[in-house]
Amino acid sequence: MNPIGEKYLRKKALPFLWCPGCGNGTILGATVRAIESLGIREDVALVGGIGCSGWIPVYIDADTLHSLHGRTLPFATGLKMSNPKRKVIVFTGDGDCLGIGGNHFIHTARRNLDITVIMVNNQIYGMTGGQVAPTTPLKAKTKTSFYGNPEDPFDACELAKVAGATYVARWTAAHALSLSRSIAEAITHEGFAFIEVIAQCPTQAGRIIYGTADPARLLDTLKAQTVSVKSASKLDAEALQGKWLIGTLHHDKGKTEFSRSYFGMAGPRGGKPAA
Amino acid sequence: MNHEKSITEIKILQGNEAVVEGALAAGCRYFAGYPITPATEIAELMSERLPPLGGVFMQMEDEIASICATIGAAFGGALACTASSGPGISLMQEGIGYAAETEAPIVVVNVMRGGPSTGMPTAAGQQDIIQARAGSHGDYEIIALMPSSSQEAFELTYRAFALAQHYRVPVYVLSDEIIGHTREKVRIPGGLRPIERKHPRERENYLPYKAGADDLLDGMPAFNEGYRLLIDGQLHSEDGNRAGHLPDVCAQLTERLCRKITGHREEIYDLETHFLDDAERVVVCFGSPARPALRAVKDARDRGVRAGYMKIRTIWPFPEEAIAALAGKARTLIVPELNVGRVVQEVRRVTAGRTEVVSLPKLGGLLHTPDEILAELMKRRRP
Ligand SMILES: Cc1ncc(C[n+]2csc(CCOP(=O)(O)OP(=O)(O)O)c2C)c(N)n1
Ligand code: SF4
Ligand SMILES: [Mg+2]
């Protein structure tokens, strides 16, 4: 185990329940490095959803709440508002965040509550064995889109932005260092910060959608499908067709954060939360 | 912030307002809710009263969010509460199971309306008593209190917070539309102290889910107090880690979650009784029907019937011993309730045929009249 792993892993939660080559491990590593770089281990409150991705915070030895399917954001809201000083980081799957939890997602973004949301987009319901998700590509065959997915997927970052998120970024599991820096930036950002991480799921999406369970090949495919925000400005619409834009997509430092807004309006305590 | 008042105050409050006063006196500083008749006044008053106390009121996007935010706030260190009615309480059930399993001390107020589905939004019922005990999936136990006046709405809500902290369990206040909307005198005693959360005795090697011989956990630390807690809705070992692969651990935890409530039921019970010494026919009641029931019992006694009265303020855990003891003395137990006859089945189970048990159900949103209960008391009068 590397030193940072030695320092941060919740040993009793091991072994990982993830399949070999799964992207969730990379995201775990990137998160831990971000927490270490900011020196905020005792200030973080980690919340996980239900799904493979929801296990990331369980493996981090800090204060962790492994919640219900789709409900990370309300739990995070209670944690944040009962002590706005804590740094709440949420780990949620694409199904967890955009499917069952979609309503909480748009409303928590709208409030601009100061939390960091890391959504692992593996384009499928991984934990339950490869069913169609709100992110599954059109026409893709999954266990519950036998004849091909008849639905268009969500663009989670666009959705976050229009709903009111003030920091929006997208990375893939092939960009571990940039991801880690982005997580640190998101935690530091005062407001609703959303990071979508496109991650390889060799066992389900890999086999079922991409026709390979080889993590290296899946990562290559991911990389080939991405265009950085900077280079995108030089490309025309045709060249951008079917590509993921990666990087910081939106950063608004001007909008008032929810807990500030709330305590600012609230009564004679002059904007101070209860001790 | 300390909300203690030293002098006793008399106020005219509807039950819903009394719930808010009881919660604030107990130290509730977080409320998440969603509007629904007949519970809405609780949210409205909380939105006015909490902010000046440094507390948080949030109208969430739905009741699922409300219950989950309430649980999040509880682990965040706040005394937290939500309130709703029928449809909203149904949406909360998965969260209530999570609270039971993770031993989150929260208070859930259900101002009951009648009927399934949208039912009778503006009329009372007591049709959610079974749901309160077992509405979420899996085996677990909760505590449920039933006020029959604004005064009790205040007192029982205050106590609900104390019980939630002590037993680390979700506690329901099962009010109803009649109690919620009836305005009457409430005595708010001076010197009421906010409920304090007990911190663990041990900090070194603290295990969040290690119970004592009494089946209860060692206090409750909040997040970011240095304990590095793992809270998980999966059945877990004492350290919080999932234990799905350990059948014994899962079995023992499930048993303890039930036993920590049922095993302490005699400490939890709260009954009000009148005229039981010589009573042959006893009205066993709870919530709003307890009001006409007392009148009926007094009228019956005026007419020479040896009538008695038992009001159950703590419906879950069910006061088995007290009811069983009645069976040895009284010949008939009469159970008025605003449903098809649910609690009466518990009374029958506990008395096991040793006494006559009469069900007096009332549906449609109206309360029993004293005369309806009196008629039952007079009807089978024995020589
Ligand atoms: C209310 C509820 N419905 C369904 C499930 C079953 N379930 C568990 S994980 C999951 C899907 C997870 O997919 P996603 O959120 O994309 O996470 P992933 O496993 O892909 O990381 C489902 C449907 C559940 N736990 N709770
Ligand atoms: S199913 Fe996919 S997402 Fe889940 S652990 Fe396996 S590889 Fe990872
Ligand atoms: Mg997924």
Image (spheres, coloured by chain):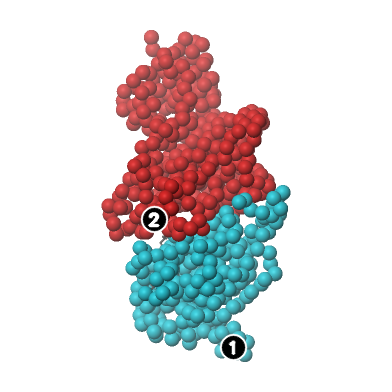
- Vertically, is B274 above or below B220? above
Image quarter of the N terminus of chain B: top right
Q: Is residue A164 visible?
A: yes
Vertical comparison of B40 with B368: above or below: below
Seen in the picture, residue B208 relative to B341 is either above or below; the reply is below
Q: Which chain is red?
A: B
- Closer to us: mark 2 or mark 1? 2
Q: Which residue occupies the foreground of this view, B356 or B272?
A: B272
**Pointer 2 and pointer 1: residues touching (CB < 8 Å)?**
no
The residue located at (61%, 72%) in the rendering is: A167
- Residue B173, position in %: x, y? 51, 39
| B79 w.r.t. B312: above or below | below
Q: The cyan chain is which one?
A: A
Could you tell me residue A65's position as x and y percent? 46, 59
Where is mark 2, residue-wise?
A: B205
Q: How many labels does the image show?
A: 2
Give the percent coordinates (x, y) of residue A206: 39, 78
Quick one: label 1, few (<14), some, or many (20+) residues within 10 Å? few
Name which residue lies at 57% across and 71% down. Answer: A186
Q: Is mark 2 on a helix, strand or loop?
A: loop
Tell me the residue at 62%/90% (across/down): A234
State the mark number for residue A47. Answer: none
How far from the left and from the top, in percent, is residue A181?
A: 54, 77
Locate residue B190: give its quadrant: top right
Q: Which amino acid does label 2 sit on?
A: Asn
What is the three-letter code of the residue carrying label 1?
A: Ser
- State the mark number for residue A231: 1
Q: Is mark 2 within 8 Å of ligand 2?
A: no
